[in-house]
Image (spheres, rainbow, N blue to C red):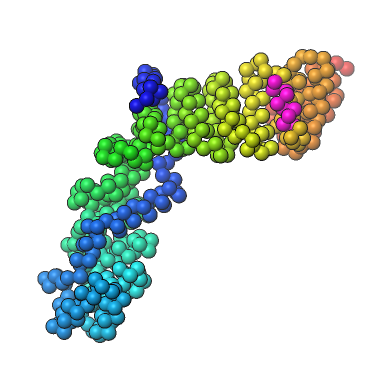
Amino acid sequence: MNLRTIAIIAVILAAAAPATVRAAADATDAAASTNFRKEELAKVWNDPTFQKQFVAGYGVNAEIEPRVTKDEVAVLEKVRPMMAESLPAAEAELRKAMKPDCSPILDYTLGGILFQQDKLVDALVAFRKAVEKFPTFRRSFRNIGLICVRNGDYEGAIGAFNKMIELGGADPYSYGLLGFSHASRQDFQPAESAYRNALLLQPDNVEWRLGLTRCVFKQGKFDDAAALLDVLITTYPDKSDFWMLQAHTFLGMKQPLKAAMNLEAMDELGKSTLDSLYTLGDIYLTENLPDLAFGAYARAVALAPEQPVARPMRSAEQLASRGGMGQARKLVEAIRAAKKDALDDADKRKILKLDSRLAMATGNGGAESAAMLEEIIRLDPLDGEALMLLAQHYAGTGKEGDVDRAMLYYERAAGIEQFAANAKVRHAQIFVSQSRFAEAIQLLRQAQEIKPREDVARYLEQVERIAKSRR
């Protein structure tokens, strides 16, 4: 762990008691959740133990399963070695020997051969035919459940797995995929129960533990989620997803500084993402640690210089709103340095506008701010926000001639529909300060026609009373 990280953690530990902070985001958004489900399912399907269990399932358990005739046994014995050499040949041989009233075991075996060739539709037909002939054929129900999961038919999978369990069949994969199916339907309570059963039977399976973690997290059982993630992080310390999910768990537990330590650990491992760094910065900002917040935001900018400017600029604005003016200006410089010559005119205007607002807020950057705003207007003469800010700047300087310039910019802003009402009100205020009440009243009435507001209506009444009293 380097000195920077040690220093950051020291600041975290020395901070005051954590304040309540709203979790920055769900640990997995809709797109991330879909990817997670696909990856989880692929890991189960590729598990060697699962594959061995599936292939071994071609045998017959005479106590609880359909009987086969001697002729059918001969067919199975002929087909079984063919399955290891050529599945299409085994399929052809089996179909040739099958009759409409053959044993469900043959339908089941055909379904397995089709399943292994990824002919899922035909395989499902074969397995369903097997259970039609023999309604307690639980291995067929298991495979129906497997195919339904693969096809995204989670309701069908749940029904099949439940029937299998009802018939006395239970294994960790069936419980795990039952949990997966419930979770995919956003029904996390039964999913949790199924995953717990799967984990009980197969405690070292990462997918079951992670699935259970996700279920308890979704139900707001953050203590349980944090404990489960402790095991996962201890076992797989280089897995950034586990650190990130536990960070969001700590946020849910109202322990933001613990979340920050997780996110710093991710950074130390070289696993930081834009989301993790911006979340880290938001936590520090909420905890009134603007220097650390700036550091996290700056790392996010450096991590992906090509990212759109909107997100880092929003972070700069948040720093400024929390009193971190210096840090906000440094972040703007970091954004500008990262982008170099890649800024288009729209992004240039955004950065210049934020720069000018920060300069105005410090109270000692009037000329600098005005220059920036003039540059924005040069890039886009119809930038109403820049026109308003520049007019506001000149109206407040108190210098001779600047008031006229302010009124000119307010007139230009009034020609832009979005800013017309506010520009006319601000322009009217200048007229009032000059005792030009008739002109002010005219502008205020025009502003009310565009966008009626109670505060402007009261102001108009006051100006009209003053104007009458001066006659």
In-front residue for pair 328/249: 328
Magenta region includes residue 111: no
In-front residue for pair 258/349: 349
Q: Is residue 201 left or right of residue 452?
A: left
Q: Position of residue 292 (x, y in %)?
A: 46, 23
Magenta region includes residue 372: yes
- Please, what is the dominant secondary structure of the magenta stretch? helix
Q: Position of residue 461 (x, y in %)?
A: 76, 24
What is the span of residues highlighted in magenta in the rendered image? 368-377
Q: Is residue 459 left or right of residue 222?
A: right
- The image shows residue 37, relative to residue 157, as above or below, that is above
Quadrant location of the C terminus in the rendered image: top right
- Residue farthest toward the left in the current orientation of the protein: 63
At 40% across and 23% down in the image, what residue appears?
4
At 22% across and 55% down in the image, what residue appears?
172
Q: Is residue 385 left or right of residue 23?
A: right
At 66% across and 15% down in the image, what residue appears?
364
Q: Is residue 445 visible?
A: no
- The image shows residue 29, relative to residue 281, as above or below, that is below
Which quadrant of the figure has residue 130?
A: bottom left
- The image shows residue 58, relative to residue 6, as above or below, that is below
Q: Position of residue 448 (x, y in %)?
A: 75, 33
Q: Position of residue 434 (x, y in %)?
A: 82, 17
